[in-house]
Image (tube, rainbow, N blue to C red):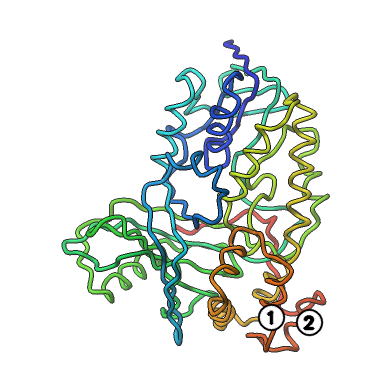
Amino acid sequence: MQSNTCDLAILGGGLSGGIIALAMAARRPDLRVMIVEREARLGGDHVWSFFASDVPADAMALVAPMIAARWDGYTVHFPGHSRGLATPYRSATSERLDQAVRAVLPTENILCGAEVVAATPTSVTLAGGSTIAAQGVIDARGITGLPHMAGGWQKFMGQSLRLSAPHGLERPIVMDARVEQLDGYRFVYCLPFSETEVFVEDTYYADAPDLDRPLLRRRLADYAGQQGWQVESVVYEETGVLPVIAAGDFDAFWAEGAGGPARAGARAALVHPLTSYSLPDAVRFALHVTSLDNLSGASLERASHAWAANHWRKGRFYRMLSRMLFGAAAPEARWRVLERFYRLSAPLIERFYAGNSTLADRARILAGKPPVPLGDAVAALAGGGRPLADLGLEKSKKT
């Protein structure tokens, strides 16, 4: 039986775990950090996009190696309203994340193709019997649901398309809601990585997590055809089902993993409750970990709990908006909520996505006639309205 020792063991080489590894290498290079990933490479197969304003300026260098494309602004389209915004936009890829982590950690500290069968605050047992003894362990593996929480789902299929002629896009389309509204609030998302390569994603704010992949592929093909794009090949495809949190019992959620290691990412509910964005919170938490004097197992777990509990408290306003979206708006009319939001000021929109809305921002978002029936809005906020989905249920996926 082989045994390894380290100061910090990170379970899961996705976005959250990868960024913790990068932060530790940059700010605590004296410590031995190991990262364990069950797949053949770190990061899986994903594109993560974010606004430059989401990440503090002094932390941008941390994520810079992951970035595959940069734009000076973006566009949104709704049935009666289109708008261009000048907020810089960035996209990171799994391939870049894998390369970035491998550039800063020794090869022997990266265990890919390794399945974790048990973990404690100070130890990891892998399939085959090998173990890791660590001063502290952080569990950053993804989970299929959020027990004791309710809301809805943001689900999507994205494809990287190689075209036979230029697509004509100069910057990303973050939301194109001019498409037929099906299965909740639906929009298409486009990232122009080159003149003839575009990443296109069909996204839904839906009440159920089911993914019908053949259907979504047809819809993506239809959208490309409507734009006049001639597709030579689909280079890459990804799918995802992310929780949109409207309500929950954080203490009960955390108690589900009592006695285990510290947590990060989705396992700590470190996501934006309404947008499901996770990169800004992944960066903030990673920097927090590097600042801790005590990385021992129990202390690290308490630190992750305190950070996640504070994040939950700060997310109350966004959970309220999620209740409005899922509990008060009819699925086919949810686009009106986002259309109204995108008529607000650009700085307010930036702070919203970063999870840093001010009191004035919150008042402005709620001011005026609501884009949903007033009675339904009041009912949703009072705990009634349309029923919310149980986010603790394991997500079903159709093939």
Q: CA distance from mark 1 to mark 2?
A: 7 Å
Image quadrant for the N terminus? top right
- Counting residues from the start of the chain, the first of labels 1 and 2 encountered is 1
Residue depicted at x 77% and y 60%: 248
User: Which mark identifies residue 216?
Assistant: none
Question: Residue 292's quadrant in the figure?
Answer: top right
Please state which amino acid type lies under the numbered disc 2. Answer: Ala
Question: Residue 358's quadrant in the figure?
Answer: bottom right
Q: Residue furthest left?
A: 164
Tags 1 and 2 in contact by the CB under 8 Å rule?
yes
Please state if 15 lies on the left or on the right of 152 as rendered. Answer: left
User: Which mark identifies residue 379?
Assistant: 2
Q: 254 above or below 2? A: below
Tag 2's secondary structure? helix
User: Which mark identifies residue 328?
Assistant: 1
Image quadrant for the C terminus? bottom left
Residue depicted at x 28% and y 76%: 226
